[in-house]
């Protein structure tokens, strides 16, 4: 084990994005005694956080810690920061990173906390930030974390990752120390790729689990999808240079277990509503809710296809949410696929003996 006893926490954090997760991470850091400035897009939200210690839209019924400052002024947020967290949805990460660049002090590390892959480029979030803010160490924070539970002080663990050997991954160790409180426990990793693929893929698998739960299927089905989904996650992560161990950690199976089994997950809930027959436009009663897995279904499968990988559960979700195929048809295609080996490295493919019957069963049963 490398002796990291000389590691010092960061003292002044800028958290960019005052939605549920940005506010939760800012709360953790403030509870840890650090100086925290939270950047919000909207004036009224910054004023609410400063004047009432609440963020009622994103974290209802919670009180934020004293001394947590919010601002809409990016320069002010970044002025004295010795570390930065970017916590907006993955679609906006490039734009937000570009907005931070003119105000970023030299050498300040940046941690991305969004779970996604960029459309068109297929880049992971840390790669996007590295392109927009060159010359800064870039890391990621991910794991099984519902923002509301974190703010309510439920014991919560995350992975903080930077690339490189343990000495180069020092910013990850410093950020882990910075965010450690009596209830929040970060672990350190040097595998950004594995952690990021875990976060993006679990969103898609959670939609699949939601769809099948919403359609009325039980725990057997969910366990099958989580396990096979984990296999898809592992193949993509390893293909891109991540490790199997990371996929079996908090950012992989940990986040899968959480997100695939709770209606607190927006991805699972979105899927559950679709599976119960709610039309796309009526999900969440038409309210705009961040469901990263909808975009991830396309970006994950685009990336996998470009690498010659087949991710059948992610393809099923893509067929439903991106290409608007009927749920029954998409699930039937997945379920009646040829018999294969577990793990897939064993090269076996036997035609499904009841392909048509299986297909018909689900096409008739599901919306
Ligand atoms: N909510 C959670 O429990 C949770 C936990 C872990 C990780 N995450 C991840 O954190 C990221 C952010 O999710 P969230 O739950 O905080 O979302 P949210 O909907 O609660 O908040 C999103 C925030 O980003 C801002 N935003 C949206 N688009 C923007 C843009 N184009 N430019 C600037 N600001 C913009 C919004 O104003 C809002 O403040 C996602 O990638 C999500 O997967 C969320
Ligand atoms: O609400 P979800 O589905 O976006 O999940 C939130 C977090 O990613 C859970 O770790």
Image (tube, helix red, strand yellow):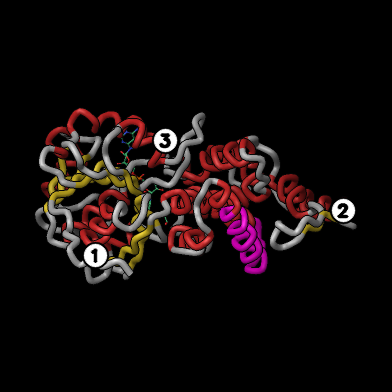
| Residue carrying label 2 | 351
- Tell me the number on the disc at residue 151: none
Question: In this image, 190 relative to 40: left or right?
Answer: right
Closer to the camera: disc 3 or disc 1? 1
Whether the residues at callouts 3 and 2 have beta carbons within 8 Å, the answer is: no
Find out if the beta carbon at label 3 lies less than 8 Å from the nearest ligand 1 atom: yes
Q: Secondary structure at mark 3?
A: helix
* Extreme residue toward the right, this view: 353
Q: Secondary structure at mark 1?
A: loop
Q: Is residue 182 above or below residue 300?
A: below
346 in magenta: no
Residue placed at 30% from the left, 52% from the top? 168
Q: Is residue 28 above or below residue 83?
A: below
Quadrant hosting residue 48: top left
| Residue carrying label 3 | 91
Q: Nearer the viewer, residue 230 or 87?
A: 230
How packed mark 2 is, by other alpha carbons closer than 10 Å (few <14, some 14-19, many 20 or more), is: few
Query: Residue 85: x, y in percent?
Result: 26, 46
Whether the residues at callouts 3 and 1 have beta carbons within 8 Å, the answer is: no
Query: Residue 145: x, y in percent?
Result: 38, 60
Closer to the camera: disc 3 or disc 2? 2
Query: Residue 165: x, y in percent?
Result: 36, 55
Residue placed at 59% from the left, 36% from the top? 302
Question: In this image, 238 relative to 220: left or right?
Answer: left
Q: Earlier in the sequence, mark 3 or mark 2?
A: 3
Q: Earlier in the sequence, mark 2 or mark 1?
A: 1
Q: Earlier in the sequence, mark 3 or mark 1?
A: 1
Q: Is residue 68 above or below residue 279?
A: below
How packed mark 3 is, by other alpha carbons closer than 10 Å (few <14, some 14-19, many 20 or more), is: some
Residue range highlighted in magenta: 214-234
- Tell me the number on the disc at residue 4: 1
| Distance CA(mark 3)–CA(mark 2) | 40 Å
């Amino acid at each position: 084990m490398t002796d990291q006893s000389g590691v010092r926490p960061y003292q002044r954090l800028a958290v960019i994005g005052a939605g549920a997760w940005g506010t939760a991470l800012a709360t953790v850091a403030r509870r840890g005694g650090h100086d925290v400035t939270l950047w919000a897009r909207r004036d009224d939200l910054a004023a609410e956080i400063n004047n009432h210690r609440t963020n009622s839209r994103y974290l209802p019924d919670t009180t934020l810690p004293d001394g947590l400052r919010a601002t809409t002024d990016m320069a002010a947020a970044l002025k004295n920061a010795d570390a930065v967290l970017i916590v907006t949805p993955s679609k906006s990460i490039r734009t937000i990173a570009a907005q931070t660049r003119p105000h970023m002090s030299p050498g300040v590390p940046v941690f991305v906390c969004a779970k996604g892959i960029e459309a068109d480029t297929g880049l992971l979030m840390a790669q996007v930030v590295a392109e927009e803010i060159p010359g800064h160490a870039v890391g990621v924070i991910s794991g099984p974390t519902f923002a509301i539970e974190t703010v309510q002080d439920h014991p919560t663990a995350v992975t903080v990752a930077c690339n490189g050997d343990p000495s180069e991954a020092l910013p990850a160790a410093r950020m882990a120390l910075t965010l450690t409180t009596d209830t929040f426990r970060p672990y350190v990793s040097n595998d950004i790729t594995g952690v990021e693929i875990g976060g993006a893929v679990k969103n898609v698998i959670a939609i699949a689990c939601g769809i099948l739960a919403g359609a009325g299927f039980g725990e057997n089905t969910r366990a099958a999808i989580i396990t096979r989904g984990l296999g898809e996650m592992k193949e993509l992560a390893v293909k891109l240079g991540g490790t199997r161990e990371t996929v079996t950690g908090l950012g992989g199976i940990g986040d899968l277990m959480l997100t695939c089994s709770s209606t607190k997950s927006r991805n699972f809930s979105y899927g559950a509503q679709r599976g119960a027959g709610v039309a796309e436009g009526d999900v969440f009663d038409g309210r705009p809710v961040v469901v990263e897995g909808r975009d991830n279904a396309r970006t994950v499968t685009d990336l996998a296809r470009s690498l010659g990988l087949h991710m059948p559960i992610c393809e099923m979700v893509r067929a439903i949410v991106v290409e608007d195929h009927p749920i029954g048809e998409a699930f039937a295609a997945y379920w009646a696929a040829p018999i294969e080996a577990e793990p897939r490295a064993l090269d076996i493919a036997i035609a499904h003996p009841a392909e048509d019957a299986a297909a018909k069963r689900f096409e008739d049963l599901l919306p």
